[in-house]
Amino acid sequence: MISSQGSIKQRVCEIISKKSPLRIHRCVRKLCDIGPRYVGTEQEVIARDYLLDMLKEAGANAHLEQYEYLHYVPGSANIQLISPIKEKIRGNPILYTSGSTQGLLVYAGRCSEQELAFLGQQGIELSRKIVITNVMRPFTVYPLLEKSGASGFIAITDTQEDLVRDGTATFERRKGSIPGIIISQADGIRLLTLLCLKKKVIARLSSYGTYSTKISSNVVGRVEGSKFRSEKVVLGGHYDTLVNVPGAVDNAAGVCVVLEVARVMAALEPERTIEFIFFSGEEVGCWGSSKYGEVHKSEMSNCLAFINSDSAGSAVVVDRNIAYVTPNAKKLAVNIAEEMNWPLYRVIEGSPPHPFSDHTVFASANIPIVWYTELAFPEYHTKEDSISRVNFDKLVKQTNLVGQLAWRLSCEGRKALVGG
């Protein structure tokens, strides 16, 4: 084993720069060729088994951890305009919603506190209304609309006119109580135009889906520490996608970062144990990571840090790199990024920061979090998130970044977080 920190850092860079690019490309290609990997589907199982085999091949001790979850199969969704015109608009059901409602449409912008306060000042209530919003992630406002008494939810896709994003109603792992639909920007503009004419717009919203109880699995691999086996660093990324989404950037690329770091760490014999987890069910409420947290609750105190790998290597050319961190990991995350020449556009702190990915359960257990990612890319949660949207040079650099962070933590333990 190489003991010098500097020589190990160089060795990590050499392994990743020389041997990783082709393997990373093959991994992303394989997962994209499988197709959308929505939880509970045959494609999810194929991806699961592939990743299990790859972890074993990488040199990790790997196994599956099964769990039970509430499964949802989306059906149809549409808006039937009744007044002042008659027209049908089709879209995607917001996942975990089912039912129909009829009522007045009201526009609430992005449902910010300021926008809702303004509506209240104008005497406009959301109760028993079908609320239209411009939001990228429906789950950030859906629970708020439920509490407000809204009878339905229309989300306008905030990207190209002909694309419709997929999205789930809530990250609380439950059925939604009001129907919801996601429509294209072009259809959304037509609805807003009607509202701008200051006419009452009445519509019937229908969104259907079916529920059942199913079994899914996390894929868990370990490279045992050579000195401090009971202490561990955890790297994770979700391998599932939404229903109609190929999921190249989100999150085949992120998964392949974790897999390649597993290969490198197995070759370098870390002092502390490093665990690698591919979670399922993230896109519909972080089912896999939540269940992992329940099963491994007694072990959480031995977890030094969790590194999330969710959405990586986007081909968007502008500098949009961000780091979501807990305060106790900020200094280390920033220092590693600087050392690896990975310019950060923004560092966002929280406990947890952006509580809608697999790091949330770890942050809730007071475990330091680092998540290097980017601002949302235009094809996020759409059918256009394909392999053509991946910048593999950037992805290799991100793999090096995560590898260096994991190695530093495995060598120095909690001291790395204190000293940064």
Image (tube, rainbow, N blue to C red):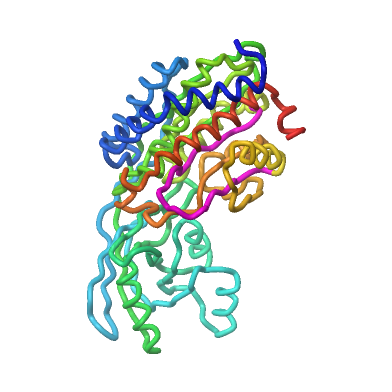
Residue that sits furthest to the left in the current view = 87
Q: Residue placed at 42% from the left, 47% from the top?
A: 314
Please name whichever residue, 265 or 184, is drawn nearer the observer in this view of the structure. Answer: 265
Please name whichever residue, 112 or 330, is drawn nearer the observer in this view of the structure. Answer: 330
Q: Is residue 86 above or below residue 272?
A: below
From the viewer's perspective, is 87 left or right of 228? Answer: left
From the viewer's perspective, is 306 left or right of 419? Answer: left
Residue 29 position in % (x across, y down): 30, 35
Residue 53 position in % (x across, y down): 36, 20
Please name whichever residue, 337 or 327, is drawn nearer the observer in this view of the structure. Answer: 337
Give residue 9's quadrant in the image: top right
Q: Is residue 99 above or below residue 269?
A: below
Q: Is residue 63 visible?
A: yes
Residue 70 position in % (x across, y down): 39, 41
**What quarter of the picture does the C terminus occupy?**
top right
Q: How many marks?
A: 0
From the viewer's perspective, is 69 left or right of 163? Answer: right
Q: Residue placed at 42% from the left, 68% from the top?
A: 151
Q: What span is in magenta?
A: 303-326
Residue 317 painted magenta: yes
Residue that sits furthest to the bottom in the current view = 198
From the viewer's perspective, is 208 left or right of 335? Answer: left
Give residue 38's quadrant in the image: top left
Residue 333 position in % (x across, y down): 64, 39
**What quarter of the picture does the N terminus occupy?**
top right
Q: Is residue 69 visible?
A: no
Q: Residue placed at 41% from the left, 52% from the top?
A: 168
Please name whichever residue, 344 or 383, is drawn nearer the observer in this view of the structure. Answer: 344
